[in-house]
Image (cartoon, grey):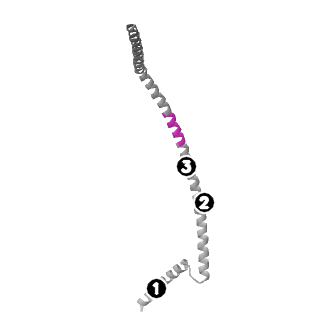
C-alpha cells in the first residue's frame, strides 16, 4: 500500500511538473512570438510614428509662425501709434517751450534785464565803435 501511495504522489508531482513545463514553454513561445512580430511590424510602426511626428511638427511650426506674424503685426501697429503720439507730444512741447521762453523774456524785459538779442545788437554796435575809434586813432 505504501508503494501505491508513493506512486500516486510521484505521478501527481510528475503531472504538476509537466504542467509547469507546459506553461513555461507557452510563455517562452509567446515571448518569441512577440519578439518576431515586433521585428516584422516594428519598423513599419516606427515609420508610422515618424510620419505622425512630422505631421505634428508641421502643424506646430505653422501655428508658431502664425502667432509670430500676428505678434509682429501688433508690434508694427504699436510702433506706428507711438510714433504718431511722439510727434504730437513734440509739437506740444515745442509750443509750451516757446510760450515759456516768451513769458520769461517778457518778465526779464519788464525788470530791465536785456534779452540775448539786445546783448548781441549792443555787441555788434560796440565792435563797430571800436573799429571806428581805431581808425580815428590811426589818423591822428
> Of the residues tagged 3 and 1, which is closer to the observer?
3
120 sits to left or right of 34: right
Read off the magenta span.
57-67
Question: Which residue corresponds to the image point at 62% horizontal and 75% vertical from the top-left?
Answer: 103
Question: Which residue corresponds to the image point at 57% horizontal and 47% vertical from the top-left?
Answer: 74
The residue that label 1 is drawn on is 130
Find out whether the residues at labels 3 and 2 contact each other: C-beta distance under 8 Å.
Answer: no
Give coordinates of residue 95: x percent, y percent.
61, 67
Helix, strand or loop for the magenta stretch, by majority: helix
The residue that label 2 is drawn on is 88
> Dividing the picture into quarters, in which one does residue 67 lie?
top right
- Which quadrant does the N terminus fall into? top left
Q: Secondary structure at mark 3?
A: helix
Q: Secondary structure at mark 1?
A: helix
- Which quadrant does the C terminus fall into? bottom left
Q: How many marks?
A: 3
Q: Earlier in the sequence, mark 3 or mark 1?
A: 3
Q: Secondary structure at mark 2?
A: helix
Label 1 – label 2 distance at C-alpha: 48 Å
Question: Which residue corresponds to the image point at 53% horizontal and 80% vertical from the top-left?
Answer: 119
The residue that label 3 is drawn on is 76
For mark 1, does the 10 Å Cα neighbourhood hold few (<14), some (14 to 19), or many (20 or more) residues? Answer: few
Amino acid at each position: 500500500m505504501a508503494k501505491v501511495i508513493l506512486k500516486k504522489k510521484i505521478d501527481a508531482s510528475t503531472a504538476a511538473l509537466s504542467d509547469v513545463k507546459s506553461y513555461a514553454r507557452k510563455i517562452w513561445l509567446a515571448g518569441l512570438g512577440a519578439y518576431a512580430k515586433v521585428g516584422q511590424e516594428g519598423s513599419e510602426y516606427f515609420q508610422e510614428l515618424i510620419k505622425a511626428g512630422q505631421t505634428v511638427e508641421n502643424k506646430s511650426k505653422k501655428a508658431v509662425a502664425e502667432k509670430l506674424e500676428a505678434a509682429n503685426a501688433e508690434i508694427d501697429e504699436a510702433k506706428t501709434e507711438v510714433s504718431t503720439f511722439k510727434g504730437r507730444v513734440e509739437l506740444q512741447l515745442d509750443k509750451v517751450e516757446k510760450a515759456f521762453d516768451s513769458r520769461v523774456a517778457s518778465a526779464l524785459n519788464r525788470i530791465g534785464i536785456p534779452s540775448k538779442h539786445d546783448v548781441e545788437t549792443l555787441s555788434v554796435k560796440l565792435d563797430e565803435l571800436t573799429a571806428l575809434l581805431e581808425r580815428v586813432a590811426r589818423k591822428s
